[in-house]
């Protein structure tokens, strides 16, 4: 018996076995089988393999179905709640900044009342040239220069960069003396709560 | 014509798997029973063909529990049965890895590894079936998986490639080599 070279037909034999071929292809394969002993033999082998009763236990579908939990749609996980320790730390930090900063202002106010939050009066330079519209860069430089000359102090809401070295030292000393910080370090478990931005 | 009280839809054999899945998601537990009944024997047979002897029902149950637990990830791009075969095969591989680890102190010989797949001893009774069993034992594990999925389960090469994590072309080659080996074996018997 000659070996058949019709590979495409041979590849369709399992589909013929499972009646999974469209009508036109089925007809084509059956026509080939009528004339090809090799493919008929291969189909007989496939049928033998398919029908070989491989032992498999009868499955109790109802019992398995009872083990299946009811459907629960996959919902996006809620954002992790901020821990109580983290909430406490936020509140404590805000309190330190407000009370500490306020006490610095009050201390400086009692020592040098003439330097606290004095708004710079308008200078005559602008009045002398009312029609001139300064360039943006020019106006900024002139304004900064006049403020540094006439408003040498800071307010609570002012930029920290405008503080002098002495002011900064005073602020740090006041913060060190402040007694509102917790006595112990917070529990390291706070490190797990990395999703929070404190 | 009067209409009676509203009844739940009757189970229909022609409902597609996707329709049954939709019913189960809507809270109809009978749809799950139908799906399990529709595919469980095929899963049991595939497990037996692949060499599983013990705990086949437990394996099938684990397959369904895992599948139903992640049905939201099933898009219907392949058939449900193909997807179930894929899950079951992974579970079988996990089992075998666990078994290998449990006897790690004793080196596993190559012949023993092959015998895991050739574990149909005593399961096929008649002479013709015995010959088939021996011919399947002559195949490599992958050839055997591809061949049984193609001949016993009727899967396409594309579906087989999905189950065994290979390509369609590789599945064709494995099938071709397997059928040649089986034919030669049965001819010589």
Image: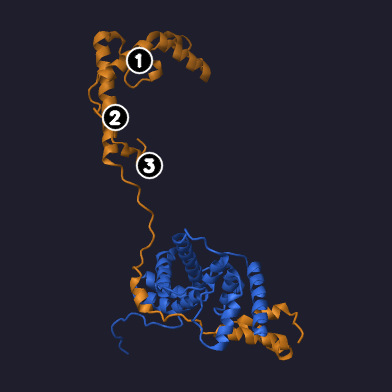
Chain colours: A orange, B blue
Image marks 2 and 3: residues in contact by CB distance under 8 Å: no
Of residues B90 and A100, the one drawn nearer to the viewer in this rendering: B90
Of residues A142 and B154, the one drawn nearer to the viewer in this rendering: B154
**Mark 1 neighbour class, 10 Å CA radius: few under 14, some 14 to 19, many 20 or more:** some
Label 2 and label 1 in one chain: yes
> N-terminal of the two: label 2 or label 1?
2
Q: Chain of mark 1?
A: A
> N-terminal of the two: label 2 or label 3?
2
Residue A39 lies, in percent from the top left, at: 70, 85
Left of A197 or right of it: where is B41?
right
* Above/below status of A81 relative to A93: below
Residue B152 lies, in percent from the top left, at: 55, 80
Q: Which residue is mark 2?
A: A93
Q: Pick the quarter of the image with the N terminus of chain A.
A: bottom right
Q: Chain of mark 2?
A: A
> N-terminal of the two: label 1 or label 3?
1
Q: Which residue is mark 1?
A: A168
Residue A195's disc number: 3
């Amino acid at each position: 018996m000659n070996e058949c070279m019709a590979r495409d037909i041979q590849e369709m034999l399992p589909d013929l076995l499972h009646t999974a071929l469209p009508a036109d292809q089925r007809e084509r394969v059956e026509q080939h089988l009528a004339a090809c002993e090799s493919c008929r033999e291969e189909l007989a082998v496939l049928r033998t393999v398919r029908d070989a009763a491989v032992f498999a236990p009868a499955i109790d579908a109802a019992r398995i179905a009872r083990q299946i939990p009811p459907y629960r749609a996959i919902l996006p996980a809620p954002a992790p709640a901020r821990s109580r320790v983290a909430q406490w730390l936020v509140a404590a930090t805000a309190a330190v900044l407000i009370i500490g900063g306020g006490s610095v202002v009050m201390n400086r106010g009692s020592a040098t009342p003439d330097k606290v939050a004095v708004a710079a009066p308008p200078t005559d330079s602008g009045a002398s040239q009312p029609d001139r519209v300064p360039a943006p860069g020019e106006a900024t430089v002139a304004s900064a220069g006049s403020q540094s000359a006439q408003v040498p102090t800071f307010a609570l809401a002012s930029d920290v960069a405008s503080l002098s070295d002495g002011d900064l030292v005073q602020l740090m000393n006041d913060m060190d003396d402040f007694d509102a910080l917790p006595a112990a370090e917070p529990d390291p478990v706070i490190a797990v709560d990395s999703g929070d931005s404190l | 014509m009067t209409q009676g009280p509203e009844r739940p839809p009757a189970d229909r054999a022609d409902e597609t798997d996707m329709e049954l899945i939709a019913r189960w998601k809507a809270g109809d537990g009978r749809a799950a029973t139908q799906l399990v009944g529709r595919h469980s024997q095929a899963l049991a047979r595939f497990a037996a063909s692949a060499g599983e002897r013990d705990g086949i029902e437990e394996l099938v149950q684990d397959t369904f529990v895992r599948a139903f637990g992640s049905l939201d990830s099933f898009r219907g791009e392949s058939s449900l049965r193909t997807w179930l075969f894929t899950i079951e095969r992974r579970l079988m591989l996990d089992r075998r890895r666990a078994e290998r680890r449990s006897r790690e102190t004793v080196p596993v010989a190559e012949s023993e590894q092959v015998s895991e797949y050739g574990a149909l001893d005593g399961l096929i009774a008649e002479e013709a079936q015995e010959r088939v069993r021996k011919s399947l034992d002559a195949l490599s594990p992958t050839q055997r998986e591809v061949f049984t999925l193609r001949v016993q389960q009727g899967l396409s090469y594309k579906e087989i490639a999905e189950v065994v994590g290979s390509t369609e072309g590789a599945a064709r080659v494995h099938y071709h080599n397997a059928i040649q080996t089986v034919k030669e074996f049965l001819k010589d018997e």
